[in-house]
Image (tube, rainbow, N blue to C red):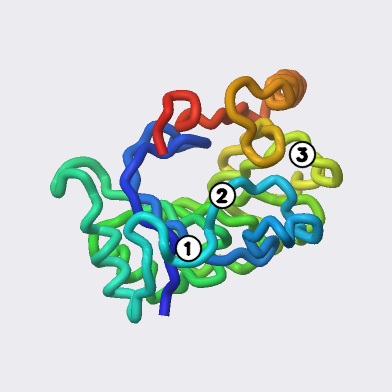
Amino acid sequence: MYRVKEVFPTLQGEGAQAGRVAVFCRFSKCNLWTGREADRHRAVCQFCDTDFVGTDGQNGGTFASAGELARHVASFWPTPGQGRPLVVCTGGEPLLQLDEALIEAFHEQGLEVAVETNGTLPAPAGIDWLCVSPKAGAQVVIDVCDELKLVYPQQGASPEDYDGIRARERFLSPMASPYGLAGEDPEKQRNTRLAIDYCLQHPRWRLSVQMHKIVGID
């Protein structure tokens, strides 16, 4: 049984594949926060602004088999036969549910499989693009990935802490104000400047901005 908050086609907004058409599959549940504001004070991840609770989101639901979920996700690819179909498995924490059976089912539907994870759980075999986004206070067990994306700055999680991870690409994503303030965000502006300065001094890192929020897409 797979529990999915929402499924929707959009453009990848961050990291190495920014701008690429993808179908997002947002799994319910996370191992670093319940997703409920009443529990925010004791969450390991303090800055998440994503709703991943339940299965009541756009095209969400419970799916009895890997094949059923894979067919559901594939049905949202905008134009069959065009482009390289991609599913981005996110959350919450997708590796609480994503397994080799589901990866194989996605592949059978012609989908490349990308995963955005906090890195605290082992990754199953077969993932085509693995993005690890570490959180302060959480032990990362994945040491090889395609993309390392660190929200910056995080107290207790500096870029140097992840030098041991072998990643093809390394990105800093500026920290926004808590709870997703509307309009101008002075804190994010300051953090963007800090991230730029860090990248200029450490060129192995690149800046990643949330393009989808800038241009106003989901």
Spot occupied by residue 83 in the image (x, y as percentages of width and height): 22, 41
CA distance for labels 3 and 1? 27 Å
- Nearer the observer, 13 or 36: 36
Q: Which quadrant of the figure contains the N terminus?
A: bottom left
Mark 3 residue crowding within 10 angstroms, few (<14) / some (14–19) / many (20+): many
Under circle 3, the secondary element is: helix
Q: Which of marks 3 and 1 is nearer the N terminus?
A: 1
CA distance for labels 2 and 3? 23 Å
Q: Which quadrant of the figure contains the C terminus?
A: top left
Mark 2 or 3, closer to the camera: 2
CA distance for labels 2 and 1? 11 Å
Residue 190, picture quadrant: top right
Under circle 1, the secondary element is: strand
- Residue at the spot x=68%, y=56% of the render? 37
Q: Which amino acid does label 3 sit on?
A: Pro
Residue at the disc numbered 3: 159
**Vertical placement of 91 versus 68: above or below?**
above
- CB-based contact (under 8 Å), mark 2 and mark 1: no
**Vertical placement of 117 versus 66: above or below?**
above
Q: Earlier in the sequence, mark 2 or mark 1?
A: 1
Q: Which mark is residue 50?
A: 2
Mark 1 residue crowding within 10 angstroms, few (<14) / some (14–19) / many (20+): many
Spot occupied by residue 89 in the image (x, y as percentages of width and height): 45, 57
- Residue at the spot x=40%, y=33% of the render? 217
- CB-based contact (under 8 Å), mark 2 and mark 3: no
Q: Which mark is residue 27?
A: 1
- CB-based contact (under 8 Å), mark 3 and mark 1: no
Spot occupied by residue 119 in the image (x, y as percentages of width and height): 64, 58
Horizontally, residue 30 falls left or right of residue 72, namely right
